[in-house]
Image (cartoon, grey):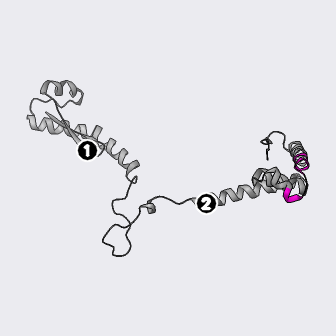
Amino acid sequence: MRFSVRYEEKIQTIELNDEETEQMWVSLSLVDEGLSKSNKERLIQDAFNDKYNKPEYNNWHKFDRHRGMPKKPFRKDDESEDTTDHMDYFPDNTDEEIREKQEEYEYLCEIIRKTLKEKQAELLIAIFLDGVSVTEYAEREGVSKSAISHRLDTAKKNFKKVFPESSTFPSCHG
């Protein structure tokens, strides 16, 4: 007797002898002496399809039918050749990511500005958020590097007074 088994999108055929078939499908109560061999095979295959083939394929198909390349690619007007570079199939989230980073940056700046005095807030924002080195900031302000380092330490201490649990600043070497 031959069974058709659906595996992913392909159908495979398994061949069993009559003894194995009767041992395997006794619980189906299909072994009736009045049925012909072809009717038994058909009934057993139908029961097998209902129990195994159909649910597996339907579940697989339900979740995976939209994965990969679409069967009909996008075309412009009446193009005959496929001249797409296939980048149309991948979402472009760069604008959203830039917006989210900008919103987070503005939120952090707002917190720092509300917490500290203006000069200390601008110092922390420039060094920790904007990535300006201590040397560059000192040159921009027209003071020594040690003065900026001292101001930075004071700004960190003041910020830690307000946010003691979440304020871990990396060491600055500029």
Question: Would residue 146 be counted in the magenta stretch?
Answer: yes
Within 10 angstroms of label 2, few (less than 14), some, or many (20 or more) residues?
few
Q: Earlier in the sequence, mark 2 or mark 1?
A: 1
Residue 122 as seen in the image, left or right of residue 104: right
Q: Helix or strand or loop: what does disc 2 sit on?
A: helix
| Three-letter amino acid code at the position of disc 1 | Lys
Label ID, residue 96: 2
Q: Is residue 152 above or below residue 24?
A: below
Q: Residue at x 12, y 27 (%)?
A: 18
**Residue displayed at 29% across by 38% down:** 52
Q: Quadrant of the N terminus?
A: top left
Extreme-bottom residue of the structure:
77
Q: Report the residue marked by disc 1.
A: 10
**Secondary structure of residue under mark 1:** strand
Picture coordinates of residue 138 (x, y %)?
Answer: 86, 54
Left/right of residue 110 with respect to residue 90 in the rendered view: right
In three-dimensional space, the C-alpha distance between marks 2 and 1, rounded to whole angstroms, equals 40 Å
**Looking at the rendering, which quadrant does residue 31 occupy?**
top left
Seen in the image, is 63 located left or right of residue 150? Answer: left
Q: Nearer the viewer, residue 18 or 26?
A: 18
Residue type indicated by callout 2: Glu
Residue 90, visible in the rendered structure: yes
Query: Which residue is located at x 33 percent, y 73 percent?
Result: 79
Residue extent of the magenta highlight = 139-150
Left-right relation of 52 to 166: left
Q: x, y (%) of residue 112?
A: 83, 53
